[in-house]
Every structure is written in C-alpha cells, then in structure tokens.
Image: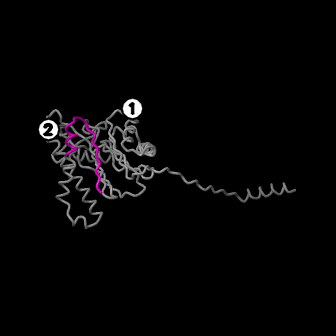
C-alpha cells in the first residue's frame, strides 16, 4: 500500500500553493514511470528506497521551476514562495522529504522522533551552504529577506535562487527514511506556526492524549490548531495527523523500579547491638 501526505506553508500568494497541490502528484507519477523498472525492485528494499529518495528530490526541484513559471506568467504580482514537506509510506517504509521549516514528528510509543530538520538560515549547516552558493545571512535572514533557507518559488527575489531551483534559497529537499514498527503510532506534520508554540515532544503528548480520548485524527488536527491559537502563535497554522494503526494509542504504564537497599558492616553491628540490648 502506498500513501502520500504533503503540507505546504505559503509565504505569500495563492497560486503557488494551488500549483504545488496538483503538480506534486503529477511529477511523482511521471518521474516514477520514467525511472522505475523491475530491475530496480529486484535489487532489494535498500535500493528501492534509494530510488524513492532520488524521485522525491527530482519531483520537488522540477516542480519548483514549473510552478514558478505558471505563477509568473499568470500575474507577476502573485510571485511568491512556499515551503513543502512530503511523507510517503510504502508498506512499512516511511520516507519524509522536507524543503523549508515545516516539520514531521513521529510518535514511537509516546516518544517524539523528528523526521525532518527545520531549514533556518541561522542553522550552521544551512549557513555554510548559503554562503557557498553566493548568499549571506544577516540577522537570521537569508540575504536579509527570508527567515527560511529552503523553499519552492521566490524567483522574484534577486540573487536567492538559480535557474535549476538551487542557489542560496534551495528547493532541494532533505530526505529521511525509517522502517516502521508496531511501536510507531502516528505522525504529526505541521508548518512553522505549530512549532513556534509546541516542542516536538509536547505536540506528541498533546496529540496522543486526544487520540486516546476519541481516536479521530481530523479532530486532533483541529485541537492542535486551537491550542496553538491559545498559545498565541502568530504565524500560519496547518497540520496533518497520520495514524499508522486504526486503534487508539495504548495507555503506557511505567514499570515500578525495584528498590535495592544495602547496609554497611558498621550498620549491621549497630543493629545487632540494639537488638541484643532489647533481649537483655
């Protein structure tokens, strides 16, 4: 079984997000048809996951060029950008591709496992990549303009993106994979407005309690957004909850630790003396 979940966080404008929604699946199908053959599958799961990682990277970079061409040709005033995160589940294999500051967090038996890394200009690895591409970071902003280091679009900003979708503001995704187990319960995919007010473990704890109450991922999404608003999030709020089991998360009971006590030889002598005095 194959499932694809994706999330976009628009920096401005509507046309880019609409274009991303229909172009992403289209490029996924076209790219896979061009590359995938039986030889790829027969080489084993590791080789197949490598193929999927390459496919998603090509998909995002190709989409970047095509979507922005559509946006610019439709109306130059609508030129904009969007971050993107896609999660692909094939059987028990999970692949997460991220370009921007959306985040995917997996819940493994109550423990939060981050399946993506926030691409902020202030991050040391991103800062090195930006500077190597001819850009700079000023006061935490890429070229003093954007507070995100990777995104689709923003062609209208001079000096941040090359014609191949790379450059200081790159559309190249960072891909993480994982083999899902029975302990992996659900995953939260959210834009930066969610993570501005939730730590990853905090969001997992919150969502897990709600799913235990009603086991409804749609309602859980709404509750996460409502809670982010209560916590005064000042950014866009988009979230997707993907459950890997039809049953609600189980209640976890921590085993009671065995307490080991020891007494010194001196303590034993004092105790023996006390007991002897009682006998007298």
Spot occupied by residue 236 in the image (x, y as percentages of width and height)? 31, 35
First reached walking from the N terminus: tag 2 or tag 1: 2
Q: Is residue 220 left or right of residue 270?
A: left
Residue 17 magenta: yes
Q: Label 1: few (<14), some or many (≥20) within 10 Å?
A: few
State the SS at label 1.
Answer: loop
Q: In which quadrant is the N terminus drawn?
A: bottom left
Q: Residue at x 39, y 36 (%)?
A: 228
Frontmost residue, 242 versus 67? 242
Which region of the structure is painted magenta?
1-22
Spot occupied by residue 92 in the image (x, y as percentages of width and height)? 34, 58
Which residue ends up furthest to the right in the rendered image?
280
Spot occupied by residue 5 in the image (x, y as percentages of width and height)? 29, 48
Q: Please name the residue that numbered disc 1 is placed on.
A: 232
Spot occupied by residue 137 in the image (x, y as percentages of width and height)? 28, 40
Q: Label 2: few (<14), some or many (≥20) within 10 Å?
A: some
Q: Is residue 271 left or right of residue 166?
A: right
Residue 116 magenta: no
Callout count: 2
45 vs 254: above or below: below
Q: Please name the residue that numbered disc 2 is placed on.
A: 72
36 vs 154: above or below: below
């Amino acid at each position: 079984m194959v499932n694809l979940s994706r999330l976009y966080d628009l920096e401005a404008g509507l046309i880019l997000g609409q274009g991303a929604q229909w172009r992403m699946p289209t490029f996924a199908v076209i790219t896979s048809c061009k590359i995938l053959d039986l030889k790829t599958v027969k080489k084993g799961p590791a080789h197949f996951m490598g193929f999927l990682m390459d496919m998603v990277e090509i998909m995002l970079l190709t989409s970047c060029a095509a979507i922005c061409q559509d946006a610019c040709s439709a109306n130059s005033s609508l030129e904009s950008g969007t971050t993107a995160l896609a999660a692909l589940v094939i059987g028990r294999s999970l692949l997460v591709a991220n370009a921007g500051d959306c985040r995917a967090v997996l819940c493994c038996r109550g423990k939060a496992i981050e399946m993506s890394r926030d691409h902020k200009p202030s991050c040391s690895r991103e800062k090195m990549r930006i500077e190597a591409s001819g850009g700079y970071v000023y006061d935490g902003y890429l070229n003093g303009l954007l507070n995100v280091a990777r995104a689709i679009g923003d062609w209208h900003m001079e000096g941040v993106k090359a014609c191949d979708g790379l450059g200081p503001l790159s559309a190249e995704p960072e891909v993480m994979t994982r083999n899902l187990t029975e302990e992996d319960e659900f995953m939260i995919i959210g834009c930066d407005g969610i993570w501005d007010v939730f730590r990853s473990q905090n969001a997992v704890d919150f969502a897990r309690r709600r799913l235990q109450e009603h086991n409804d991922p749609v309602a859980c999404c709404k509750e996460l957004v409502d809670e982010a608003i209560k916590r005064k999030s000042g950014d866009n709020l988009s979230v997707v909850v993907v459950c890997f089991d039809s049953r609600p998360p189980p209640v976890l009971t921590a085993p009671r630790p065995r307490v080991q006590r020891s007494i010194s030889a001196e303590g034993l002598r004092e105790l023996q003396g006390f007991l002897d005095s009682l006998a007298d």
